[in-house]
Structures are given as structure tokens and as C-alpha cells.
Image (cartoon, rainbow, N blue to C red):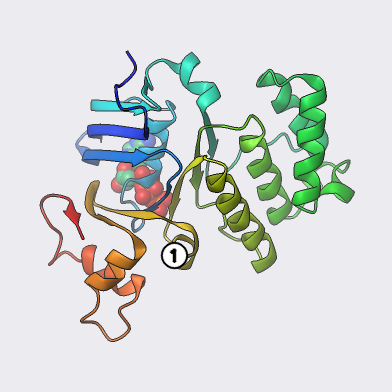
Amino acid sequence: MPSSNTDVAVETSDLRKTYGSEVALDGVSLTIPIGTVYGFLGPNGAGKTTTMRLLTGLSNPTSGTRRICGVDVEDRRAIAPLIGYLPETPPLYEEFTAREQLEYVADLRDIPGEDASERIEHYLQEFDLHDDADRRIEDYSKGMKQKTAFIQCVLHDPEVLFLDEPTSGLDPRAARRIRESIVDLAEEGTTVFLSTHVLPVVEAVADEIGVLYNGQLVAEGTPAELRSRAETAESGSLEDAFLAVTSEDTVATSTDRV
Ligand SMILES: Nc1ncnc2c1ncn2[C@@H]1O[C@H](COP(=O)(O)OP(=O)(O)OP(=O)(O)O)[C@@H](O)[C@H]1O
């Protein structure tokens, strides 16, 4: 049953995921309004990928609820058109050309032919891939592969876009292209859930930040709010704030709205 709150893109309540005795996610509750760029920060092993897999229906929670635009993620068929997901290792058919890969995804997504061609051309131009679009993906650089993967998850114009470390390993130009696209998509109303441990990336694009540590959401706020938390530190940077809220000594027992 859809949630009554139609302004909310991502909503979880007490989401938990355990693997045997390992607690990967320990009761995470999120409410992310439509159109937000939500920076999901956390050190290695904090549970970021686990959260994204739960939110995209690739994995089931041990307990708790999750909704995307009011739709229960359990309803995989209803969820699929609403979301785009760029995992850390994106699925691409290496033997395809980028154009073939994107046409294939457009087909899977039931994007009508003319629409699909227009969107594919638009994105190939936007990401400087047009001249290489008919080369096989196996011959692409990491950045070219990542840009192709980014295009394939936005091609169907999802309501909510999940990005796992989207700029990792990219050169500054490619990373900037992705950051600019995130901002453009958000301006058009797309909600972007961006997981990373690269602080300058979230600082540049995020409206709101959630910090995950040991499977718990330990702080939430705007970048400025989180920075002000570190104001006693010399630079008062987001990095200071991040280190402060993810230190064993200072972790709060419940989410700290700063
Ligand atoms: N399939 C699995 N089986 C067992 N444990 C798992 C599995 N997937 C994740 N975990 C554990 O859950 C915890 C959270 O992992 P997760 O990959 O979500 O972290 P992360 O924040 O994405 O880390 P990173 O930044 O390194 O990618 C880790 O302790 C990890 O070992």
C-alpha cells in the first residue's frame, strides 16, 4: 500500500540486515524528501552497499521496512521503473559497444524506439562518448566504462537514483561530468542517493548528509550543519566532522541531528 507521504522519495524504518552473527545494518531509519541529493557517508564496512542493495530490492532485510516514492520495495515490478542503480562494479557486456549496451538497456526498460535513440544520442554527446560509441566496451578505459554505466542507469529517467562511489577511480574531467549530471538531475526533480567516502564529492553536490558507522546512522544534517559540528577543530571541515562522528569515543546511540 503506498505511503501517505507523497513528498518522500526514500523511507526506511528500523532497517536491519544480519549475515549470521555479523550485523551489517543495525536499525536504520531514513526519510529523504523528493529532489534531495542525499550524501551517504561512512567508512569501509559501515553498511553503505548493504543499504543500497536493500533499497534497490537486490537483497531482503532481516527486519524493518523500506519504501521508494511510497511503494514497498518488496513489490519489485513496481519498484523497477522508479529506480536506477549504479553499483560499485557496474554490469556491462564487454563484448557490446556502448551504443549496443545502451540500446539493450533501453529495450529492457521498454523505452520506445525513437525516444530511446534520442536519449542515447543526448547522453553519448553529454558524456563525450559519441566518437567511441561504436567501439567495444572491453577496449574502454575505466572512466569510459563508468560513464556508460552511469548513462544506462539514468536512461529510463528514474525517480530515485542510487549511486555507489560513482566517481571512484575517475580522472577529474570525468568525475566533474558525473557531478554536474547529478546536480542537473536533481534540478529536474530526481532524488539522488549517493554513497561515498570521498568527502569533496558530497560537499560539492549534497543537500543532506547521513553518516553511517557500524551499521548505524550516527549523524544527519546539511553539509554546513555537519561542518559546524567540527567548528572546534582547526579547519571546521566536513572531514573533521566525519572523523568526529565516526570515532569510537563519540558515536551516539541514536541519530544525532546536527
Ligand atoms: N554477503 C555478505 N556476507 C557476509 N557479510 C557481509 C556481506 N555483505 C556485507 N557484509 C558485511 O556487512 C558489513 C557492511 O558491508 P558493506 O559492503 O555494506 O559496507 P560499505 O559501507 O559499503 O563498505 P565499503 O565502503 O568498503 O564498500 C561488513 O562488515 C561486511 O563484511
Instruction: Tell me the amino acid under the disc marked 1.
Output: Glu
Give whichever of 98, 45 is nearer the camera. Answer: 98
Mark 1 Cα shell of 10 Å, populated few (<14), some (14-19), many (≥20): some
For residue 55, above or below residue 229:
above
- Which one is in front, 209 or 196? 209
Picture quarter with the N terminus: top left
For label 1, the SS is helix
| Residue occupying the point 34% across, 56% down | 42
Kindly identify the residue that appears in the image at 37 percent across and 46 percent down.
Answer: 48
Whether the residue under disc 1 has CB within 8 Å of ligand 1: no
Task: Indicate the quadrant containing the C terminus: top left, top right, bottom left or bottom right.
Answer: bottom left
User: Compared with residue 38, is residue 30 higher up or lower down, i.e. above or below?
Assistant: above
Residue 152: percent from the left, percent from the top? Answer: 67, 36
- The answer to whether one can see residue 95 in this image is no
Point 30% across, 74% down: residue = 240
Residue 174 percent location from the top left of the image: 68, 60
Instruction: Tell me which corner region of the image, top left, top right, bottom left or bottom right, holds residue 107.
Output: top right
Residue tagged 1: 203
The quarter holding residue 199 reads bottom left
Quadrant in which ligand 1 is drawn: top left
Up/down of 206 relative to 8, above or below: below
Tell me if I can see residue 68 in this picture. Answer: yes
Residue at (75% x, 43% y) in the render: 123
Place of residue 85 in the rendered image (x, y in percent of width and height, measured from the top left)? 53, 36
105 left or right of 40 in image: right
Q: Residue furthest bottom?
A: 234
Vertical placement of 198 versus 109: above or below? below
Q: State how many labels appear.
A: 1
In which quadrant of the rendered view does residue 247 lie?
bottom left
Task: Report the side of 63 relative to 113 (left or right).
Answer: left
Residue 214 image point, x, y percent? 23, 51
